[in-house]
Amino acid sequence: MTFHATVLTLYPEMFPGPLGVSLAGRAMAEGKWSINAVQIRDFAADKHRTVDDTPAGGGAGMVLRVDVLAKAVDYAREGGADRPVIALTPRGKPLTQGRVRELSDGPGVILLCGRFEGFDERIFAGRAVEEVSVGDIVLSGGEPAALMLLDACIRLLPGVMGAPSSGSEESFENGLLEYPHYTRPQEWEGRTIPEVLRSGDHAKIASWRKRRSEDDTRSRRPDLWERHTGVRVQSASGAQREVQDD
């Protein structure tokens, strides 16, 4: 089964972009995945191909029209009704590695890229569009976020990465950050590779990597550590609180 991505965008020339080189580019050439970038303006009803209008209630900027967006989504679904429709927006649910794996196991995705002030809210209920955010940042448009999401999915497709274990020993796969890596030279500017990694003792190496993964997650991403352990954690203010189930 080929993973197929349809990207609804005002800038189709941005695709495949960086996805046309390296692992993703080779996988596309081998037929493991494909992409179709569709111009949203093609679904505008007037001669000026208008896709946006002023926000109801006033305010700065422009908003993408729901009638134009709906026509674009309907068109994309004709070629794959079983593919989820995802809008890239900072108002969406944070993208996780777990969700990426779910998407990569499926037939593909339909990605809706916003511009201006964003989408008319009615598109999400009217066409069952999933809202996804790639981080607590605001981009000029959804296209860079779409490229990020697709790259994350494509690299997990069967046969794309060289070693089968490459995707299972990375950050977030087990709820933790990945352990640090080293390679030659053995010494650089007085800094050496940890001795345990040069010992050849695979059990000790595995134990070291597990410990470093846990330590780094605890210190760098206490939010991940809290979810991973499900135990009491101490906040920055020093107050103790219980992890509550949703």
Image (cartoon, grey):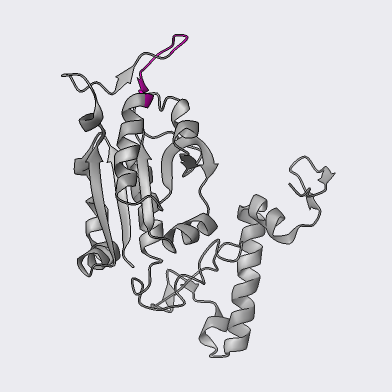
Q: Residue at image x 37%, y 17%?
A: 61
Q: Nearer the viewer, residue 157 or 201?
A: 157
Image location (x, y in percent) of residue 107: 38, 60
Residue 189 appears left or right of 172: left
In the image, is residue 142 part of the stretch drawn in magenta? Answer: no
Question: Which residue in the rendered view is the most extreme toward the bottom?
Answer: 200
Assess whether residue 60 is covered by the magenta stretch: yes
Identified at 41% across, 14% down, the residue is 55
Residue span colored magenta:
56-66
Q: Name the quadrant of the N terminus.
A: bottom left
x and y, in percent, of residue 230 in the image: 76, 57
Which residue is nearer to you in this view: 85 or 30?
85
- Among the 4 quarters of the image, the one containing residue 73: top left
Q: How many marks?
A: 0
Q: Residue furthest left?
A: 47
Q: Position of residue 72 (x, y in %)?
A: 30, 36
Could you say which is closer to the camera, residue 86 or residue 244? 86
The residue located at (79%, 57%) in the rendering is 231
Residue 111 position by quadrant: top left
Q: Is residue 49 visible?
A: yes
Considering the whole magenta stretch, tell me its main secondary structure.
Answer: loop
- Camera sees residue 140: no
